[in-house]
Image: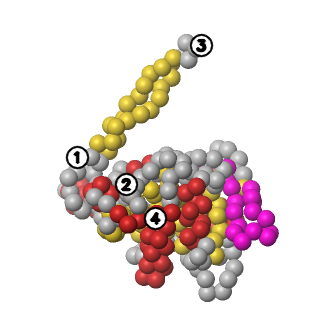
Amino acid sequence: MTKNKPLILITNDDGVTAPGINALMAVMAEIGDIVVVAPDKPQSGMAHAITMSETLYLNKISTENDPVTVYSCSGTPVDCVKIAVKEILKRKPDLCVSGVNHGSNSSINVIYSGTMSAVIEAGIEGIPAIGFSLSDFNWNANFEEIKPFIRKITLETLKNKLPKDVVLNVNFPKLKQKDIKGIKICRQAKAFWAAKFHKRETPQGRDYYWLSGEFTNPDQGEDTDEWALNNGYISIVPVQFDLTAYHATKQLNTWNWNE
């Protein structure tokens, strides 16, 4: 590792061979020393799942002569962060970045996202962390347009330090660099997926179900991540992993719990 350069851990949920993580590696290599630990297969929608009932495998796929150290992991994005911190890295990284995800992780998607769960796990470990997502599900999406913004956001984060127990959820609109209007700090939109299950039958006569859904956004606020993305801005939502509903404690304390 290079003296005075930040140590950056990179992961994702689309898999170690995804174009999005290659774009992230290219930017981070200009900023610091990088180590990549990512799933060996797509792990989208795994949220904060960890591997407990199966064997976990780690495979170093870079050689000693490669400029970047890369591992694939058989587990989830959260597994990748855990095993990187506990088994691979000799010291805690200065930053963890996850992505670039193929598809948005705005609004309620943050709950299901493997990309963001890796970021949250890093935050739990006391590591500053950022999740990057592009609103384009195409495997061959154009990540070149957002690289300058990834660099800017990363450098600002390293320079200014994140608030304690806060990580960042960054989403990019599917636009050319010249058409992106800027960066907005946002709140998470109160939107949701209206889930549907398609019931089908196997050739053997067994019923099975296929999950689909329609994204619904009744939140018309102009301070949300959804508004920013729909209006040509990059959204940054500060995310905390303390799920306590502090605003509800006063009301709950008026109930007769002990009588």
User: Dividing the image into 4 quarters, which one contains the N terminus?
Assistant: bottom right
234 falls in the magenta region: no
Q: SS class of the residue under badge 1?
A: loop
Amino acid tagged 3: Gln
Q: CA distance from mark 2 to mark 4?
A: 17 Å
Instruction: Report, in whole angstroms, how far the alpha carbon at label 1 lies from the one at label 3.
Output: 42 Å
- The answer to whether the residues at label 3 and label 2 have Cβ atoms under 8 Å apart is no
Q: Earlier in the sequence, mark 4 or mark 3?
A: 4
Q: How is the image coloured?
A: secondary structure
What is the distance, in whole Å, between disc 2 and disc 1 at their CAs? 14 Å
Q: Amino acid at mark 4?
A: Ile
Furthest residue in direction bottom, as rendered: 4
**Of 130 and 137, which appears nearest the observer?**
137
Precedes in sequence: disc 4 or disc 1 = 4
The residue pinned by badge 1 equals 218
Amino acid type, label 1: Pro
Answer whether residue 237 is visible to the viewer in this image. no
Give the labeled residue for mark 3.
204
Task: Indicate the position of residue 173 as horizontal and vertical percent values.
Answer: 38, 57
The span from disc 4 to disc 3 (Cα, nearest Å) is 48 Å
The three-letter code of the residue at mark 2 reads: Ser
Is residue 54 visible in this depiction of the protein? Answer: yes
Residue 106 is labelled as 2
Between disc 2 and disc 4, the foreground one is 4
Pointer 4: what residue? 146
In primary-sequence order, the first of circles 1 and 3 is: 3
Mark 2 Cα shell of 10 Å, populated few (<14), some (14-19), many (≥20):
many
Point out residue 190 in the picture as x, y percentages from the top left corner.
27, 51
Q: In the rendered structure, which segment of residues is drawn in magenta?
A: 59-80
Residue depicted at x 57% and y 77%:
31
